Image (cartoon, rainbow, N blue to C red):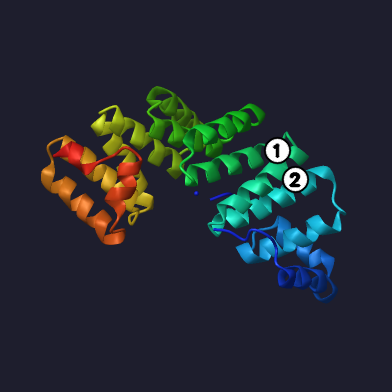
Amino acid sequence: MAKTWTFLAILSGVFCTAVAEAPRAQGYEAFYRKCYEDAASDQVITSCTAVISRGLVDRDDLATAYKNRGDAYDDKGLFEQALEDYDRAVRTNPLDAEAFNSRGATYIALERYERAIEDFDQAVRLNPSSAVTLGNRCFARAVLGELEQALSDCNEALRLKQKYPGAYASRAIAYLKLKRYDDAIADYTMLIKSQPDNPYALFGRGVARRMKGDVGGGDGDVAAAASIKPDIAEHMARLGISLGDSR
């Protein structure tokens, strides 16, 4: 189950009752399947809770159940609950690279970039061939201004997985901050080819174009980005990319 980039503090009594009764109606096998296969977030949460509570799986599968439920909580914006499950996952199986990567991605959502990098470092140690983890660490490093390290991560991610959108998006941020505007434009353009309505890519390319003197082209990209996501300028500023820098 892939991790993609709020709270249920405790499972309510009603929820627990539903989980307890549902296995009799659907069968434990149905919960097992939905916990470990792609399913809607609510189904994953319900199913993995049933699997965890039964205690019938081995250590590695239990860690994956926690990780998958954490991913589902993350998808719903329930970040604190996601972190709790990722903590349980890595305690249960300290060799689960995907759990460290998922927890790092949640820390990115919370803008705790230094903490995210710690998890990505561990995930890379466990699985150095994960383009997704390298792309995630590239992003966190780019936001923090660790630009050459970010480029190294993204270049390796693209070597492992050609045309990986996450790596293009993250590398473009590093290029922008390094004032390598042609390279930033090239990466954003590559991303826009597959994601023409990506407001982050449109805004970033607009800034790079303006810095190159293409005010008309830059303004067009920025306007397109704002039409898709009106608060895009605020979001990009939090990543260290400001339209004011190009004026």
Q: Quadrant of residue 26?
A: bottom right
The numbered mark at residue 63 is 2
Query: Residue shown at 33%/57% (left/top)?
Result: 197
Residue 103 % position (x, y): 60, 42
Where residue 15 sits: x, y (%)? 71, 69
Q: Residue furthest top?
A: 148
User: Residue at 39% across / 41% down in the picture?
Assistant: 169
Left/right of residue 95 with respect to residue 221 in the rendered view: right
Choose top left, top right, bottom left or bottom right for residue 143. Answer: top left
Density class for disc 2 (Cα within 10 Å; few <14, some 14-19, many ≥20) is: many
Q: Position of residue 83 (x, y in %)?
A: 62, 46
Q: Look at mark 1 in the image and give the residue it sits on.
A: 96
Q: Position of residue 30 (x, y in %)?
A: 78, 67
Q: Quadrant of the C terminus?
A: top left
SS at badge 2: helix
* 9 sits to left or right of 64: left
Which residue is found at the position 17% from the left and 52% from the top? 220
Element at badge 1? loop
Residue 196 seen by the camera: yes
Asked if marks 2 and 1 touch (Cβ < 8 Å), the reply is yes
